[in-house]
């Protein structure tokens, strides 16, 4: 039986060793650096099945990417090489999504417990929910 030279090429498996910037908010948009080996140009990155954006294979050991939005919790980071055969490397629980803290935009000096608070993720005090007071209007003086 003849031997065919160069008839088979062995590819090392993709490995994902670390993610620099291991946490971010559920909104996504965090730039991360993925460190590993055997990364190929055209590789894709997913965070628990959600595609990262702006994926750049810097070299065979580094990829930069921007995280997608996702629910809170730890997720697997997966790098898939698309050139030649599909090879996949996974870092289990390699990135953790956290809930973003409320953002205060401004505080006006008005009267009342929460009359002047504005922002994202703020919760109205229970008294205002029970009495259905419109907090967009300032309190009236008696």
Image (cartoon, grey):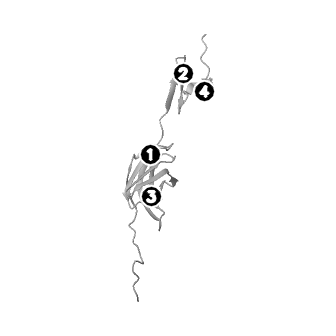
x%, y% of residue 45? 47, 55
Distance between mark 1 and mark 4 Cα atoms: 43 Å
Residue found at x 40% / y 69%: 11
- Circle 1 packing at 10 Å, graded few (<14), some (14-19), many (20+), is some
Distance between mark 2 and mark 4 Cα atoms: 19 Å
Distance between mark 2 and mark 1 Cα atoms: 35 Å
Residue toward you, 36 or 107: 36
Q: Which residue is mark 2?
A: 116
Report the side of 18 relative to 125 (left or right): left
Instruction: Name the N-terminal-most of marks 2 and 3.
Output: 3
From this view, report whether residue 13 is shown above or below residue 28: below
Instruction: Name the N-terminal-most of marks 1 and 3.
Output: 1
Q: Mark 4 or mark 3, which is nearer to you?
A: 3
Mark drawn on residue 100: none
Distance between mark 4 and mark 3 Cα atoms: 50 Å
Secondary structure under the numbered disc 3 in the rendered image: strand
Q: Mark 1 or mark 4, which is nearer to you?
A: 1
Instruction: Name the N-terminal-most of marks 2 and 4.
Output: 2
x%, y% of residue 29? 49, 44
Distance between mark 2 and mark 3 Cα atoms: 47 Å
Secondary structure under the numbered disc 2 in the rendered image: loop
Secondary structure under the numbered disc 4 in the rendered image: helix
Mark drawn on residue 31: 1
List the single residue furthest toward the bottom.
1
Instruction: Name the N-terminal-most of marks 2 and 1.
Output: 1
Residue toward you, 7 or 116: 7
Mark drawn on residue 130: 4
From this view, report whether residue 138 is shown above or below residue 100: above
Q: Which residue is mark 3?
A: 79
């Amino acid at each position: 039986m003849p031997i065919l030279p160069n008839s088979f090429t062995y590819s090392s498996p993709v490995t994902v060793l670390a993610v620099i910037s291991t946490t971010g908010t559920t909104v996504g948009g965090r730039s991360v650096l993925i460190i590993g080996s055997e990364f190929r140009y055209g590789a894709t990155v997913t965070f628990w099945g959600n595609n990262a954006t702006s994926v750049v294979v810097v070299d065979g050991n580094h990829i930069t990417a921007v995280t997608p939005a996702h629910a809170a919790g730890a997720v697997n980071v997966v790098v898939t090489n698309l050139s030649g055969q599909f090879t996949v490397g996974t870092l289990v629980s390699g990135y953790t999504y956290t809930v973003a803290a409320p953002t205060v935009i401004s505080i006006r000096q008005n009267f009342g417990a929460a009359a002047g608070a504005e922002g994202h993720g703020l919760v109205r005090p229970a008294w205002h929910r029970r009495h259905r007071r419109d907090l967009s209007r300032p309190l009236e003086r008696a």
